[in-house]
Image (cartoon, grey):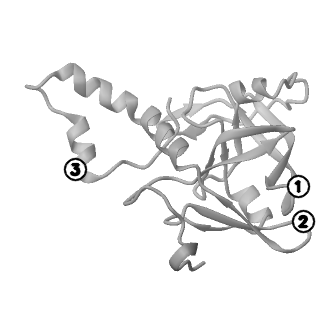
């Protein structure tokens, strides 16, 4: 993926933002979807599932042990298969995705990991905040970032790190200062 001149995407730069996109899931546009090549599962939060007006009857309970999620272990509620539509109306990829349902507060509603990214043959350009994928007709389609939403999610995810630093006051160690000088930490779901 190469962009020059007028084709160069415009976004606030420099940035170290994650790729956050919107995708239609079960007929509803979900806006806070993190594209995470480091995740070995696709995850949807219980709160997001409720916004889909989904009854939850299709959730298959899991008897698996705890899952490492952020810095905590989480017991998943179960698995659910939901229809998902990548792309716009002209060049789309429709598929059904098996989501792991978790009941924890996070900065993101959905985390799309390697299972779905591999199925759509995704190519990701982090600097350009862009994802290209194979559409249903075999052509190449693309999705662009929502940089504003990515930054909002980032602020939500670091809030637990910043608040203890504020409590220490000016004489105590400032965690917020350390994060700012070293650059933002990797974005992970808020727990």
Instruction: Name the disc covering residue 136, or none.
Output: 2
Residue at 76% of width from left, 25% of height from top?
Answer: 51
| Residue 98, x across and y down, in percent | 82, 45
Return the disc, 1 or 2, that comes first in the chain's sequence: 1
Instruction: Name the disc covering residue 181, or none.
Output: 3
Return the disc, 3 or 2, that comes first in the chain's sequence: 2
Q: Residues within 10 Å of mark 3 (few under 14, many from 20)?
A: few
Q: Relative to the observer, which residue lies in front, 15 or 163?
A: 15
Q: Quadrant of the N terminus?
A: bottom right
Q: Residues within 10 Å of mark 1 (few under 14, many from 20)?
A: some
Q: Place residue 31 in its image quadrant.
A: top right
Q: Relative to the observer, which residue lies in front, 39 or 33?
A: 33
Secondary structure at numbered mark 1: strand
Distance of label 3 from label 2 (alpha carbons): 45 Å
Q: How many marks?
A: 3
Instruction: Name the disc covering residue 94, or none.
Output: 1
Q: Are marks 1 and 2 in contact (CB under 8 Å)?
A: yes
| Residue 104, x across and y down, in percent | 60, 26
Q: Please give left or right for residue 23 compared with residue 14 in the image.
A: right
- Above-or-below relation of 146 to 37: above
Secondary structure at numbered mark 3: helix
Q: Please give left or right for residue 186 compared with residue 63 in the image.
A: left
Q: Relative to the observer, which residue lies in front, 108 or 99?
A: 108
């Amino acid at each position: 993926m190469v962009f020059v001149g007028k084709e160069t995407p415009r976004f606030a730069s420099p940035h170290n933002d994650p790729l956050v996109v919107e995708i239609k899931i079960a007929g509803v546009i979900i806006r806070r979807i993190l594209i995470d090549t480091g995740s070995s599962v696709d995850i949807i939060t219980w709160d997001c599932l409720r916004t889909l007006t989904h009854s939850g009857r299709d959730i298959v309970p899991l008897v698996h042990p705890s899952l490492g999620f952020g810095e905590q272990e989480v017991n998943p509620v179960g698995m659910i298969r939901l229809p998902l539509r990548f792309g716009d109306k002209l060049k789309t990829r429709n598929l059904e995705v098996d989501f792991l349902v978790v009941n924890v507060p996070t900065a993101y509603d959905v985390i799309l990991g390697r299972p779905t990214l591999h199925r759509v043959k995704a190519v990701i350009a982090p600097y350009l905040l862009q994802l290209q994928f194979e559409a249903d007709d075999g052509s190449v389609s693309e999705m662009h970032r929502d940089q504003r939403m990515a930054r909002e999610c980032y602020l939500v995810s670091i809030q637990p790190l910043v608040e203890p630093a504020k409590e220490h006051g000016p004489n105590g160690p400032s965690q917020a200062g350390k994060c700012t000088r070293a650059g933002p930490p990797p974005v992970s779901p808020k727990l």
